[in-house]
Amino acid sequence: MNPKLFLLLWIWLLGWDCATARCVSRGECVTINGHPKPCSVNSEPTPIFNNITGAERDDLYNILEQRCPHLVINEEGNRIPDDEILTCCDPIQVEVFAESLLLADSVLGRCPVCLRSFMRQICEMNCSPDQARFVDTVVETAPDGTEYVNEINYRLHNDYMDNAFKACSEVMLPQSGMPSVNLMCGNAPVCNADAWFGYTGDTENNPFVSLQVNFLRVNSTEDSMHVHAPLCHESIEGDIPCSCIDCSANCPSGEIIIPPICTVLSVNCIGFSVAITFGVISITVFIVLTLLEYKRQCKLKQNSNSTQNEVNTITRGFQSLFESIGTFSADNPIMMIMMMSWVVFILFFGLGRLQLTANPLELWSDPQSISRQHFNYFNSRFGPFYRAAQIYLTIDLEPIQVDNTTYGPAFRVEAIQELIKLEDAIINIGREEGSVKLENVCYAPLRARGAEQKLSDCVSMSVSAYIPNRIINNNTYLTNIQNCLNNYLSLSCLQSWGGGADPELSLGGYEEDFISAHTHIINFPITNHLSKVDLEPTLEWENKFIELMHDYEQNWKSDFVDVAFAAERSIEDEIERISEAEIIPVAISYMLMFIYVIFALGNVRRIQTFFLDSKISVAIASIIIVLLAIVCAMGLLGFMNVTITLLAINVIPFFILSVGIDNVFLMVNSIQYIQTNLTKYSEYKEDMSFEKNAASFLER
């Protein structure tokens, strides 16, 4: 090639390169509406460390090394000399955007690769010495005549946008259990790369953005920012890899080896073997017992006369025992009455220790169980889990159609008005009478200990949170709700307590899409306490909440609403209500049983012997003994520290009554049988003996 031609070509390329390596913005010139705006320039990049030394230089270098390492470290990993670090930003600008990245750290920092890609595009837009190649600015003039950049068109290569989004799309936000990018996509129906980048530069919807940045997709590498954006499974030197939770590509990829399972006729071999073994043993035992019984029956037939009156050895033993007890009692009536009186007297004091409760935890959870121990350990360290007050409003109306979109009955304006009306009534509980209010008992996780109790700190979840200031605008309320359904954690949907209303907890009656819902769910988490004294205000508020809901259901709810509600104390209240409601039927059954005993126990043969044959005194005595047995049973439960409900107290006497009365009937019938069939003492036979009923008493 001609040397002159080569020299001219080299000079032209050098001039072209110098022309493109220019800056279009630098530093900060003015503040508009509280937002700093960069200066509009058309100059070459300058060394950022000019005239900076000492600690100031070290601080700036550390920021660049952490946030924009490509500016201070070359591809070989060596530090670039200070005078060769050319940028289109100044130190103040670096400090400002580095501070703004602290929020991104908390959201995306779980995956360093993702955070690196997100920071890289910010560094390139602000500081790249090649800024003019992919950044266009919209310049405006301030009142003092200063030209500033009011808007930026930022050209990003397709691959960079897609790969950066892929690297971050699986990073989880532990506080919500959702991908972090959902928080950074605003109200976009679908969170993709365009929505993600778009929201980070949207001054209208993102209050953290001071400068409007329009991210433009470009296929060409000549006029776009096209650096490599590593995926989440790619490692960067000096950074820890992303976890499996935040990057599925880093999860173990080996296939799970399932060992072959032995089966017989589609049944597991072990199960089949156990079934066969059990069957063989059962059949063998059955055959052996059958043969033994057959031999016994044959022997009985051969010796029928000698074995006519034989009874089971165990039964005979009990008969002898109770015969001795009966004989001793008949011979020493005063001693027996005194002994039993003292037993009753002692057990009577156990009634004072009887523990009545309606707490489901005490009724259905063993205090010594592992789960109960874990529960107590958690409560002692972190406090009890919050209580819940919930309302379900099912809307019986037709769906509505707006802009070719069909919304379920829950989104009709009448339903939203009903929702807000009921919420206002709940919020105002206790205000007129000056008693416990919602802010006194609500769950407020961001309220400092000892701080003023404000209603705005209280957590609540319902669709009303999606409506600004809870004021319904017929023209915009559906748009507001739809935006928050897309992303309830977007800034426009956050409530004063610091969080958003999860649609899954605020709507019901839908199959796939939230917008088909026909039920509103209102959630009020309530603070819980271990101390019963501290819990009293909470129980008082819950009681008033239930009273309000009963009044709403009976008197002032709209006809198109079906309501269901519950508070934490609802289960206990229902147990107490059922227990108290059962007292009258149980008492009536006791009285009827007593009357039946009085009239049915005797065997009246003629009027002259009515009082003797009716056994009225026996009936009354038996009733008194049954009542004393009931007292003893409950006193014994008190001494054993058994926790029971009022309903159980209603049931226990009924069992004792039925068993005791049955035993009285058995004894009286046995005596009557002996009296009827025994004419001479010599005719007495063992089957007429009173002790033959002892086994029946014990069984009962």
Image (cartoon, grey):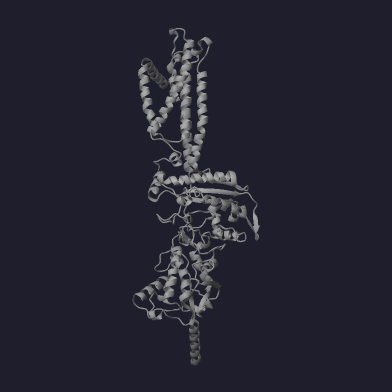
Q: Is residue 535 above or below residue 232?
A: above
Q: Is residue 491 above or below residue 29?
A: above
Q: Position of residue 660 (x, y in %)?
A: 46, 23
Q: Is residue 362 above or below residue 498?
A: above
Q: Position of residue 98 (x, y in %)?
A: 43, 70
Q: Between residues 351 and 56, which one lies in front from this camera angle?
A: 351
Q: Is residue 164 left or right of residue 318?
A: right
Residue 72 appears in the picture as rendered: yes
Q: Position of residue 699 (x, y in %)?
A: 45, 25
Name the residue: 46% across, 20% down.
Answer: 620
Residue 408 appears in the picture as rendered: no
Q: Position of residue 409 (x, y in %)?
A: 62, 52
Residue 367 image-quadrant placement: top left
Q: Between residues 69 and 328, which one lies in front from this camera angle?
A: 328
Residue 334 image-quadrant placement: top left
Q: How many marks overall? A: 0
Q: Residue furthest front?
A: 433
Rendered-image quadrant of the C terminus: top left
Q: Between residues 590 and 14, which one lies in front from this camera angle?
A: 590
Q: Residue furthest left?
A: 54
Residue 45 image-quadrant placement: bottom left
